[in-house]
Image (cartoon, helix red, strand yellow):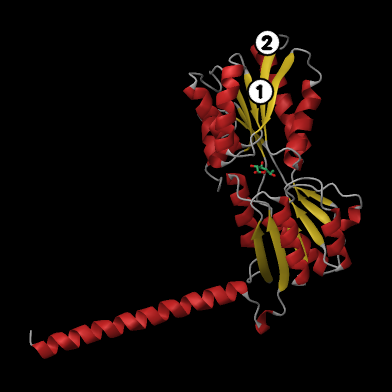
Amino acid sequence: MSKKLALSVVIGLCLICLVFMFLFSFSDGVSSYISDEKTVTDDNLIMVGVSQLGSESVWRTANTESVQNALTRENGYFLLFSNARQIQENQIKAIRGFISQKVDYIVFSPVTETGWDTVLTEAKEAKIPVILMDRAADVDDDSLYVTRVGSDMHSEGKQAGMWLEEELRNKGTFDDEINIVVLTGNKGSSAEIGRSGGFHEIAAKHDNWNILAEVDADFTTSKAKEEMRKLVKKYPDMDVVVSQNDDMTFGAIEALNEAGKTTGVNGDVKIISFDACKEALIMVEKGIINVDIECNPLQGNYISNVIKSLEKGETIQKEYIVDEMVFTQDNVSEYIGERTY
Ligand code: GYE
């Protein structure tokens, strides 16, 4: 190859690189511009501020995706999304930010049940309707939020207790002493309050049910594993673990296995879990988890429907409870394939 030809090849390649670099930086700039700022043509979009409480679980990720997939531009929304990383103060800041940005609606999933009166009063004064997603808020004045879309956590807790009654009856051990350990999600969250309350309601009917410990494991796998390592040493005779979400269940099972204990249908320790994400349903099918009480995170379309109704001036309910099931080895197989999270 002549020197001249080689030089023109090098120059040609450099030019191609420059064109690509230009295109990449341009497309980056456009996408971040589109997602961060409202343009003039967006004026007819409904602006919604969503404050998600965190990303602690598989359930939460599915819940986030569901709301993000429902509140899209194509569906007529301009979405501002904020993740509070399980800290109430972060949620309060995010809500104040949405108020100052004059959003049309605020959607939020309260990390704890109490402590919202002041900030929600500020939203009400700014005439911004607030929709609770997933968890409930305990406020003095009900008119501080327009509706809640979520689950009946108390009923989920009761379902767990009722499953255990049935299981013990079937095994002929209904009147035997039974040792129970509970891993709760973060204390003071409506998911924990509901599930603990519902389970206690059933447990209170049985003097032979000994709740040995109730430990907060934050709804996370790592914390549950750490806590269960201690619990299994302290209570090697535990018969049942009630774990208030699947992520904690995974950690608890790992710790139990490490301690030489088997779990599930033919195991040493019965496992009751909540959420029913795909990975856990597979463990139900294999008999590693006995029962999984479903909690449905796919709430995005419900939220969108509520907003569309409010836009039309229609009256809406104060609460929308999503559909849920109870999964055991008997019924789980037909549902695993369709589970998306
Ligand atoms: O069960 C758990 C999540 O609030 C119902 O929060 C939700 C719970 C869910 O972290 O996995």
Q: Quadrant of the N terminus?
A: bottom left
Say which quarter of the image contains residue 211.
Answer: top right
**Left or right placement of residue 96 versus residue 139 in this view:** left
- Name which quarter of the figure residue 273 lies in: top right
Q: Is residue 243 above or below residue 166?
A: below
Q: Amino acid at mark 2?
A: Thr
Residue 145 can be seen, yes or no: no
Q: Label 1's element?
A: strand
Residue drawn at x 75%, y 50% is 110
- The three-letter code of the residue at mark 1 reads Val
Between residues 91 and 300, which one lies in front from this camera angle?
A: 91
Callout 2 crowding tier (Cα within 10 Å): few <14, some 14–19, many ≥20: few
Q: Residue furthest left?
A: 1
Determine whether the residue tagged by mark 2 lies in a helix, strand or loop: loop
- Tell me the mark number nearer the camera, choosing from 1 and 2: 1
Between 94 and 263, the one lying in front of the other is 94
Residue drawn at (69%, 39%) of the image: 186
Q: Ligand 1: does it lie within 8 Å of the C-beta at label 2?
A: no
Quadrant for ligand 1 reads: top right
| Residue 308 screen position, x and y as percent | 77, 66
Q: Is residue 5 above or below residue 341?
A: below
**Residue denoted by label 1:** 181
Dot 1 alpha-carbon crowd within 10 angstroms: few under 14, some 14 to 19, many 20 or more: many
Q: Position of residue 18 (x, y in %)?
A: 34, 83
How far across and how far down the image is residue 60, in percent?
Answer: 62, 48
Location of mark 2 (residue): 173
**Residue 94 vertical placement versus 215 (above, below):** below
Residue at position x 75%, y 28% in the image: 199
Among the two numbered marks 1 and 2 on one chain, the one whose residue lies closer to the N terminus: 2
Residue 200 in view (yes/no): yes
Circles 1 and 2, Cβ within 8 Å, touching? The answer is no
Residue 102 is left or right of residue 216, and the answer is right
